[in-house]
Image: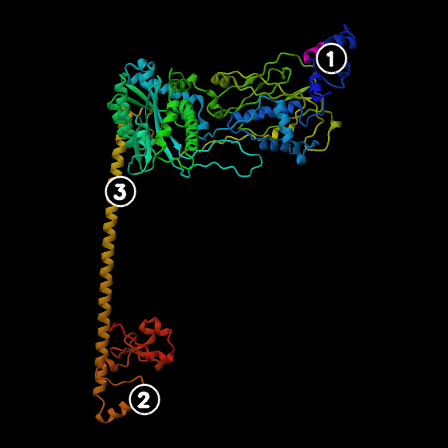
Amino acid sequence: MSKQVAANKYRRYSPSKLVTAISMVQSGAMSKKKAAMTFGIPRTTLIDKLSGKAPMGSNPGKQCVLTVAEERVLVDYIKLMSSIGYPLKRQELCYEVKKVLDHDGRKTPFKDNLPGKHWYQLFSKRHPELCERTAMALGHQRSLINFEMVEGWFSGLTSYLKQEVSDWKALINDPRRMFNADESGFPLSVTNGKVLTEKGVRHVYQVCTSNKTQITVLVCFNAYGNYVSPLIVYPGDRFRDSGIHEFDEAIYGHTSSGWMDSELFVEFLKHLNEFVINRNIPKPIMLLVDGHSTHMSFDAAHYCFSNGIILYCLLANATHVLQPCDVGFFSPMKAAWKKEVKTWQLENLGQALTKKHFPGVFKKAWLKVAKIENAIHGFQKCGLFPLNPNNIDLTKLNPSKAISHTITSESGEQIGDDKDVAVKVTGDAEVDSVQLNNTSEMSTSSNMITSLDVTTDDMNTCISTDNMNTSSQISTDADEKINHLQGIHKPTANITDITDISSGNQAPGPSYVKQSRDTVSESFSLLAVPEVKKKRSANTLRKRLPKALSGKEALRMLQEKENAKKADELAKQKRKEEREAKKAKKLEEKELKRIQREENKKKRVQSRLVKHNQSHNKKRSKTNESESSESSEDDFENPLIMDSDDDCNEELICPGCQSDEGSSEEWIRCTACSRRWHITCTGDAVLFEIPTSQINNYPFHCEFCV
């Protein structure tokens, strides 16, 4: 018999038939043999179920490492981590199970208690409600957005329209007057996902351009499905013909960085105003934008105020929830862009996609995505048309909440005497205690129900056990208020009912107990849940602009900001001029001091020379004619004394230190004026490197002759 035939023959009866057959045998209405034949159940199976050898609900085959209740706890844990924005990968899940098994101390077939690929495959098969998905990146600030903040933004928008717009009801009920604009970058180099290739190939390449440039495109449409021509922003200080003839309908601009700036946004507002006039759309219109600095300039606000455009800012860090461009347009547009780039590369092998080819390729993707249904869908999913905050996708706000785990028994048994279990919720949502409702009676009066409270604020969780019997159950019920905000009602997932644990069955290990299918080990309290820490408050408070950027209050604040900016620039320029003048004055004073020092130095040297010459002349006048020849002979023998017609060349004193001390090896004579100097007083570094025997041959010039 083939495996396929054996698989088809195996267990052709349903669990309900098995329960009915057992009840008929236990009541005496049928014999075991007749019940087996009537319900199509093997007789041995009935005998095993009646004798307790194979308990009801147990599966044939080898027992799993984790019990049914523990796997349900693990499934709830996976759902919890995914809902709060910290989903687990396959390997991370296996390491969490390893941590539980290491602490529990039970015997496992896993190497180092680490489950492998086979365990994960069987675990996924047993729990088909789980699947692997590619997680989208969500910024930390975005994860803090909750429904109260979104509802407050809608309330503020309604209040502003009531105060400032006379026909505000006609405005919010006319889809032609509700606009949204946003920018996004489209890279010239795109890569697709998995591709087909030969099995076993080590390197799989995809040829694309090496240019990492992104072209910024501003998209604007209204809730009626009318699209304004896209604004394509090229990087560079000079604008060149970069294939603009391939998409004549588009608007083109350029900035040094390639991103939107305030001046270019004002130019786009002019095109938007022309679009509204040509379409005969009543004014005022509403333009919803994010809080980027390029949208919050005085020029943009003043132009909108003068031309009947209500420029209103969306809730900060909530564009993934409230911006129609992000919700309904950019995702299919990016997918279409990648597809068109791939098509272009196949049609132009050996060429690289550049800025010149961008308009033509972008136009093909634009015509496929810029449809009426995408615009309408984006405004509906953001709750902007019709204006209703309950229409937004509240599942995007789940990371702002902490999922609470309440404790009940698997059969819904009553827990204590009307006990309430407190539910902890992070963020702005506040909930009261949730009372556990129970329907059935307790089968054993000695059973104790213990709790496992897993929240993001309190990680110290445990399961306490009684000396006799212990029952524990974990459910993923969110509190009533969170369910009301989300608009969904999650059914209680009853999980565990820990069976009797006698003290004699304890095995070595931190918390090991004899496992049954409904047992939950206390080691599951080690499952890691991120702790939400309180954000440190800022030391200074910044005055924020109102959401209505084209309103009178925002115009006043922007005007003050512009005036303050100009005043700061003038003050900065004045301080710069003062610094430069002070620096120039300081340099001038420094130069004057240097010149004064040089003059004083020359005067001192001349004064010393004059005094020395006077004293030397007095000494020479006292000598006799008879002694002059003898002294001349002595001077000839002594190289320190030499005759000269110049009185200065006959000096015996060093002009540098005004001393005549030292041996002949310490002196050198100037080649030009014949003055004698100490080698150490010359300041010439070359003299210190010349041997003593060659110093007299060196062409030395003193400071008076240089």
378 and 53: which is toward the camera? 378
374 and 519: which is toward the camera? 374
What's the amino acid at mark 3? Answer: Lys
Q: Is residue 63 left or right of residue 692?
A: right
What's the amino acid at mark 2? Answer: Glu
Res 598 → quadrant:
bottom left
Coordinates of residue 234 in the picture (x, y in percent): 33, 34
In the rendered image, residue 18 lying in the magenta stretch gets the answer: yes
Rate crowding at label 2 as few (under 14), some (14 to 19) or many (20 or more) other CA atoms within 10 Å. few
Query: CB atoms at circles 2 and 3 under 8 Å apart?
Result: no
Q: Which residue is mark 2?
A: 637
The majority secondary structure of the magenta stretch comes to helix
Mark 1 vs mark 3: in front: 1
Query: Cα distance, mark 2 to mark 3?
Result: 76 Å
Coordinates of residue 518 in the picture (x, y in percent): 67, 21
Query: Cα distance, mark 1 to mark 3?
Result: 93 Å
Label 1 or label 2, whichever comes before in sequence order: 1
What's the amino acid at mark 1? Answer: Ile
Query: Cα distance, mark 1 to mark 2?
Result: 142 Å
Look at the image and tell me in which quarter the N terminus lies.
top right
Q: Which residue is mark 3?
A: 572
* Residue that appears at 43% across and 21% down: 148
Marking on residue 41: 1
What count of labels does the image hold?
Answer: 3
Mark 1 vs mark 2: in front: 1
Coordinates of residue 377 in the picture (x, y in percent): 41, 18
Q: Is residue 175 visible?
A: yes
Please tell me whether mark 1 sits on a helix, a strand or a loop.
Answer: loop
Label 1 or label 3, whichever comes before in sequence order: 1
Q: Which residues are magenta?
A: 14-22
